[in-house]
Amino acid sequence: MSSEFSGVTDVRDRLTAAGYLPDEAIETVVYLAERLRKPILVEGPAGVGKTELAKAIATARDADLVRLQCYEGLDEAKALYEWNYKKQLLRITHARGGDVAGGEAWDEVEDDLFGEDYLLERPLLKALRNPRQTVLLVDEVDKVDFEFEALLLEILSDFQVTIPELGTVTGTHHPIVVLTSNNTRELSEALKRRCLYLYLDYPSVEREKEIVLSRVPEAPEQLAEQLVRIVRSLRQLELKKPPSISETLDWTRTLLALGFEHVDEQVAKSTMNVLLKYQQDVDKATGHLRLPPSPEMN
Ligand SMILES: Nc1ncnc2c1ncn2[C@@H]1O[C@H](COP(=O)(O)OP(=O)(O)OP(=O)(O)O)[C@@H](O)[C@H]1O
Ligand SMILES: [Mg+2]
């Protein structure tokens, strides 16, 4: 098992080796999160590497990644644990119909019913009980309601949970916790206070180019440079959905698949739908782009 991060540089090296290119803010927060045993709350627009950061930390730490995908209506039963009713029912039926003469004591049956075999472990409980080092990713936490946020807060502060039938479960290793949010609603002050805050924005041209070259190594450097600059300029427009790193990567792969080594007006127009997802954005972008015209067809 790999050791704790020894410092900021170590974080950088190990995240990079895991395929994730961090910047200084990311390195520092990741290092502190482990040192101070605090969750990281990552906010920022779609597709800037929030989820991927948690995955990369897991790889870098040789830890198991346990993911809780949040959605509206997510509750304790789906996030923490629930009892396997079907199996319990079978057990009861079996006790009744089976050994009638022997007369199985109800107490025994009941003990069984709320034992380990009938427990359905959900991500939060799994992260607590996992014997290996764990990264707990609570993805898109802004989608849950306030009641669930309160439960989460409780678990994150004590790293323990009480299951009435089983007792108190305390975490063996302190998991590294990453919460992501797309900022669709304000999170509670209490949750924010407990976390280290990291805002991920669109990267600089240089960093995005590095990301492209590391994720799509077959891309020629010049093409990467050109694409990243175009994407950057598109982000300056007031678009409904500005292109994210994901889209830059998709665009790079698209152009390579089509055999283009540089972008001209025609190429940009015909592939713009990979980058932009609204027709009004496409219209706006094509009006703005200043690219060399395509060579005349003879
Ligand atoms: N720093 C980085 N180094 C390497 N790859 C990156 C980096 N940042 C983002 N990526 C790439 O960008 C893609 C999108 O990242 P990710 O899915 O983590 O975005 P997200 O912020 O979670 O988006 P959403 O809000 O839509 O869930 C990933 O596939 C990843 O390959
Ligand atoms: Mg995500």
Image (cartoon, rainbow, N blue to C red):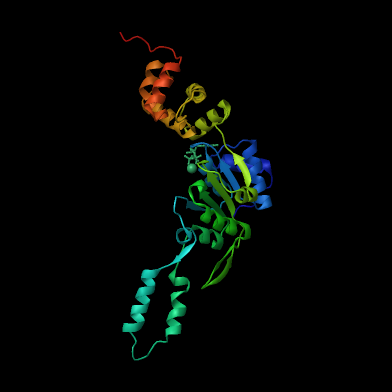
Q: In the image, what residue occupies the spot 37% across and 77% down?
A: 91
Residue farthest bottom in this picture: 101
Quarter-wise, where is residue 206 in the image?
top right
In this rendering, the count of numbered labels is 0
164 to the left or right of 34: left
Q: In the image, what residue occupies the spot 42% across and 28% down?
A: 275
Q: Above or below — where is 261 with respect to 93?
A: above
Q: Position of residue 66 (x, y in %)?
A: 51, 54
Q: Above or below — where is 278 with respect to 194?
A: above
Q: Nearer the viewer, residue 264 or 146?
A: 146
Q: Quadrant of the C terminus?
A: top left
Q: Quadrant of the N terminus?
A: bottom right
Q: Can residue 239 be seen at all in this image of the molecule?
A: yes
Q: Position of residue 237 (x, y in %)?
A: 49, 23
Q: Position of residue 212 (x, y in %)?
A: 50, 31
Q: Above or below — where is 204 with respect to 4?
A: above
Q: Nearer the viewer, residue 18 or 159?
A: 159
Q: Position of residue 149 (x, y in %)?
A: 54, 53
